[in-house]
Amino acid sequence: MEVTVNKVLDAKGLACPMPIVKTKKQMTELEPGQVIEVQATDKGSTADIKAWAESTGNQYLGTVEEEGTLKHYLRKATPEEEKAETKHPHVTSLDELSSKVDGDEKFTILDVREPAEFAFGHIPGAKNIPLGELEQRFEELDQNGEIHVICRTGNRSDLAAQKLTEKGFNNVKNVVPGMKEWSGKTNNNQ
Amino acid sequence: MSDAISVKELTKKIINGDSVFILDVRNTGDFDDWKIEGENVEVINQPYFDLLEGIDPVMDKLPKDQPIYVVCAKGGSSEFVADQINEEGYENVYSIEGGMKAWSEHLEPVKIGEVAGGSIYQFVRIGKGCLSYFIESNGEAAMVDVNRMIEQYEDFLNEKDAKITHVFDTHLHADHISGGKKLAEQKNAAYYLPPKDAEEVQFEYEKVRDGDEYKIGETTIKALYSPGHTIGSTSYIVDDKYLLTGDILFIDSIGRPDLAGKAADWVADLRETLYQRYKELTDDLIVLPAHYMTIKEMNDDGSVSAKLGVLYKENHGLNISDEDEFRKTVSENLPPQPNSYQEIRETNMGKVSPEEEEQREMEIGPNRCAVR
């Protein structure tokens, strides 16, 4: 599985506590929202990285095992995004989105999370343009079509919905809260 | 710098009933699943990654007047944390060498008593609650329910200068990987399994049948077919003095019949074994099970044993007169099955041969072979 990341940390061959000591150090150097891939061979690292991420408020995306190497993916989260502050006036709930997904109507789900987050689970058929790339890539979207924007908590999607409105899109809804609470079907990039 | 303590030394302290304070620095999920326990053991959990920059999160929980033993998964993080605690001015801080991995593998030999021409020992795997046995008479020896860490048995055998002739398993185990076949091969001994448990076994073995007798020096080991935990479960009676019950009867609980997915089919067998076959045996037999569940089942000398007559009085599982209630007890509301029990069974059948590291992972966690 191909996962786009901002930083790769090689912690192969290291025993605890070193993979976490190194991850912690690297994490302080990342910008909020950036994604790190931690490569480790210690089997215990999966549970520890996950528990560490949870205790520090970072986002554990998932782990992939390739040829004996465990690749852990983490995203540096910010406290602000948990608040799901919504300034974009048109919002929709996960329930509404869910029934729309099951219906026949044609619409676009725009997932503005990082590719690594998207890779570990997204709504089938969703299009991924990370928030940071929207400015350059908004023309890939149909300006007159109906667009539901989703992220993890509703925060980044709110910013994306505002940006699209500025660009002249007039049928944009922000899905709140977001993938964090989504219990419907997901795909991942295997 | 902090000091280190071996799991052997720690085991001795716990068996002695010493007051032991343990700081477990594994992640909380692993801690909740399985931890060091003992009569006078106090154990607290704070993951090492909360303590990388100092021990503030646990400072007010650490005792000043007694040793602090720090444990992690393999021994690296505990050393790191122990050093941190030591730097804060605590003198008596020890990292447990090899961590929970070593703890789960340590075997402590405890002498149970005499047999004709020799003696019988119980190996207590304190970290997992598994019990295995060594019976020696006039330089010959047999072993029962051997765990996979055969080097530790070999060290003991060399010390005792005994030649192993027979290696028995009471049944096809689902909670730990048997070292029986491997030990038998290395020592040119015969490996015995009950054939009804071994239908899918991929290697050569000797068949144990009800009533078979084996001479070890002057001692006699007699097989008693006693199904219920598995369809083949067989007990061994040594010198008409000791009853090795496998996973059929424990000190404070009885076996569960569901680990091969056969709860309904095997309940009647289990009942017959416990309420008829064993009942016909003499009350003076000393019951030696293959497991114990809690440290409360341990005697003062660290052994796990009790007279059959006492168990018929005190073990709840032997005192359920109503058959329907018995069926419910052993087939409904059971505790979760042991971790990886299917993979462990397949390993013990020789269908898969995982690497040592993987075998270790499969066995990690508590033992769950019994119902109360």
Image (spheres, grey):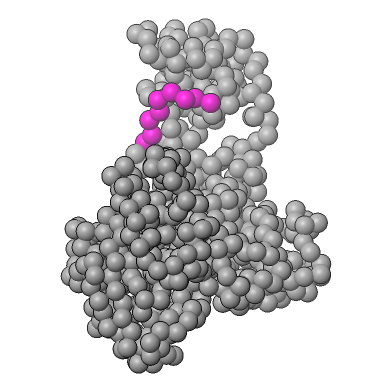
**Within the image, what quadrant is residue B284 found in?**
bottom left
Magenta highlight range: A181-189
Q: Residue B92: give x, y in percent of width and height.
A: 75, 74
Which residue corresponds to the image point at 49% horizontal and 12% vertical from the top-left? A96
Residue B72 is covered by the magenta coloring: no
Residue at x-position 48% and y-position 55%: B253
User: Residue A16, position in %: x, y?
Assistant: 56, 62
In-front residue for pair A8/B140: B140
Residue A162 seen by the camera = yes
Residue A8's spot in the image, x, y percent?
A: 50, 51
Tally of numbered discs: 0
Q: Is residue A85 above or below residue B83?
A: above
Q: Residue at x 31, y 42 (%)?
A: B264
Residue depicted at x 41% and y 74%:
B242
Q: Is residue B261 left or right of residue A88?
A: left
Front in this rendered view, residue A43 or B290: B290
Residue B10, visible in the rendered structure: no
Residue B39 in which image quadrant: bottom right
Q: Is residue B269 above or below residue B249?
A: above
With respect to residue B118, does B14 lie above or below? above
Residue B131 picture location, percent across and down: 44, 69
| Camera-side residue of B57 and A179 | B57
> Which image quarter: residue B207?
bottom left
Residue A183 drawn in magenta: yes
Position of B253 with respect to B300 (left or right) is: left
The quadrant in which the N terminus of chain B is found is bottom right
Q: Main secondary structure of the magenta part?
A: loop
